[in-house]
Image (tube, rainbow, N blue to C red):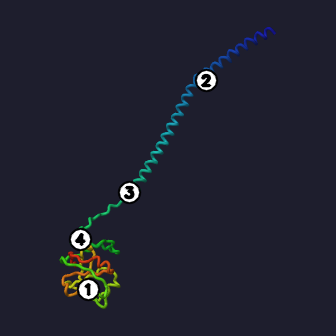
Amino acid sequence: MQIIREEIVPLSRKQNIVLATIIACIFQFTLFFAPALANQAVQEAQAAGLDQEMMVSNDSMTKDTHMDLEAAKLASTNAPVALASSSPVIAPVADIELISETSAATGTTAVKVDKVLKESVHTMTAYNSEAGQTDNSPCITANGFNVCEHGIEDTIAANFLPMGTKVKIPELYGDRIFIVRDRMNQKHPNRVDVWMKNRSDALKFGVKVAKIQIIE
């Protein structure tokens, strides 16, 4: 028994030494490589994060570039068209009258110019369609025109102008055009009489002196 014990004990010590050595090696290996592995893992994580950021940045740049291209395309499509402009012809009211007429077929605008043939100054009065001021048919003028049905104050009586003559009185009526449709008493060879619908307006007008323009 003594011999067996002496043989067994040394073997146990040897096993302990071997076991301690193995544990020491494992411990040293773990402590030696763990920081390196941890550092490598951190670097890989940082690299992965950097790659992800670069991918996000590239994706954002791609989207921005696409949006810029779309915006440029839209801007070129909706670019305003420069329209040619022409300055309107401006002339003194006393010389011409400008009337714009738009053609539905062509869309163009034509300018009608009334040429002044003659100017002269005359005494002016006003009258109404009353028997006491005219004759038994107060609404019918000397050329057979019915001013009452017409109802527009654009008729004048003048003995020195042919029937149908167009006249302007710019000092009193601006660009309004009057037409000679009636005659006055022969004792007023150079007077102009303006027809008005209301008696009160004719009385208010009274007697004036103004320049008339005979237009074409």
Q: Residue at 22% of width from left, 81% of height from top?
A: 192
Give the image location of residue 185, x and y in percent: 22, 87
Total count of labels: 4
Which label's residue is closer to the chain start, 2 or 1?
2
Q: Say which of marks 3 and 4 sits in front.
A: 4
Q: Residue at 54% of width from left, 28% of height from top?
A: 39
Give the image location of residue 149, x and y in percent: 35, 85
Classed neighbour count for the residue bearing mark 4: other residues with Cα under 10 Å, few (<14), some (14–19), many (≥20): few
Give the CA distance from mark 4 to mark 1: 26 Å
Element at badge 1? strand
Give the image location of residue 159, x and y in percent: 21, 85
Q: Say which of marks 2 and 4 sits in front.
A: 4
Looking at this view, is 34 or 46 the one in front? 46
Give the residue pinned by disc 1: 182
Give the residue pinned by disc 4: 93
Would residue 111 be seen by someone viewing this image from the given angle? no
Give the CA distance from mark 3 to mark 2: 68 Å
Which label's residue is closer to the chain start, 4 or 1?
4
Give the CA distance from mark 2 to mark 1: 129 Å
Which label's residue is closer to the chain start, 2 or 4?
2
Give the residue pinned by disc 3: 76
Q: Quadrant of residue 97?
A: bottom left
Q: Quadrant of the C terminus?
A: bottom left
Disc number for residue 30:
2
Would residue 10 be seen by someone viewing this image from the given angle? yes
Which label's residue is closer to the chain start, 3 or 4?
3
Q: Amino acid at mark 3?
A: Ser
Looking at this view, is 105 or 182 the one in front? 182
* Rendered view: 41 above or below 53: above
Give the CA distance from mark 2 to mark 4: 109 Å
